[in-house]
Image (cartoon, helix red, strand yellow):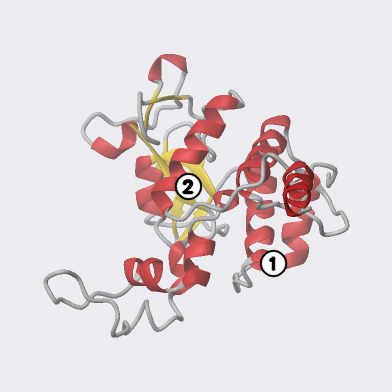
Amino acid sequence: MRLILALMLMIAAPAWAAEPPKSFAAAKTLLAQIHEDIGHLETLYCGCPYKRKASGSGGLMDTAKGCPNIVNPDIKRTARTEWEHVVPAWRMGHNLACWKPGIATCVNSKGEAYKGRKCCEDHNPAFRAAHNDPHNIFPANGQLNGDRLNHPYGKFEGPGMRTYGACEFKVGGSPKRAQYSKAVKGDVARAILYMAEKHSITVPYDRDQLTKDSAEDPPEIWEINRAKAIREKTGLRNRFILGDCDGAVTMRCE
């Protein structure tokens, strides 16, 4: 009887059921494979084609296919594909004790205390779940990723503005903000709305405006396929892309 019940449960369980990534490295590798599988090897902000490296999650800008004038051979990160948090790690963790001032359990093998992002990754499960959530992570040009840091998104004009050739992305203002193109406003909005709801993160944006941005720039096929693949491989579901359902994580929940 027990054997029959076990077999029934195995049959009933969805074949794609899996756990969310347990590390940022695992999330990046998962996403690198998903983007390759769905045929969307382009960065989020600039639509820059890239080539995935033979192993791991890294990639290089494919300048032969028209990367829009942002690769500077004098700056190593400009040719590199990195993985960008739309909602930054700082936003998820800066109010936590593990971030600052640190907690007693964050001590390395040399007996030295550490804090910040690594401490929260190591010892705060809620932070780790948010930090490694693939719905919030996208491929980006390395220089843009480095310049954006944890600056919030927003519109601005004025001195000190940094631009990136033909790419409609800029960083500047006081306090600093990052401004992306209208072409990706829905992509960004859906990631933010999801993270605020799923992980209870307070974000400095108006929800009504995010909802409007999402409606005006609806998901493209690649974004839908990406969200479905993430759901199938991790069980994490972004309803702002795939729509509402009864709350069950099933293949019928579209």
Circle 1: element type: helix
Measuring from the top left, give residue 151's x and y in whole percent.
45, 62
Residue 220 vs 147, above or below: the answer is above
Q: Name the residue type under label 2.
A: Ala
Q: Which residue is mark 1?
A: 197
Q: Earlier in the sequence, mark 1 or mark 2?
A: 2
In whole angstroms, how far apart are the C-alphas of marks 1 and 2? 20 Å
Horizontally, residue 254 falls left or right of residue 237, namely right
From the viewer's perspective, is 19 left or right of 16?
A: left
Residue annotated with mark 2:
27
- Residue drawn at point x = 36 percent, y = 68 percent: 122
Mark number for residue 32?
none
Front position among marks 1 and 2: 2
| Residue at 53 percent of width and 58 percent of height | 156
**Which residue is the extreme one toward the front?**
1
Q: Quadrant of residue 104?
A: bottom left
Which amino acid is tagged 1?
Answer: Glu
Residue 184 rendering spot, x and y as whole percentages = 63, 42
For the C terminus, the quadrant is top right
Crowdedness of circle 2 by 10 Å Cα count: few (<14), some, many (20+)? many
- Residue shown at 42%/54% (left/top)? 23
Relative side of 179 to 148, left or right: right
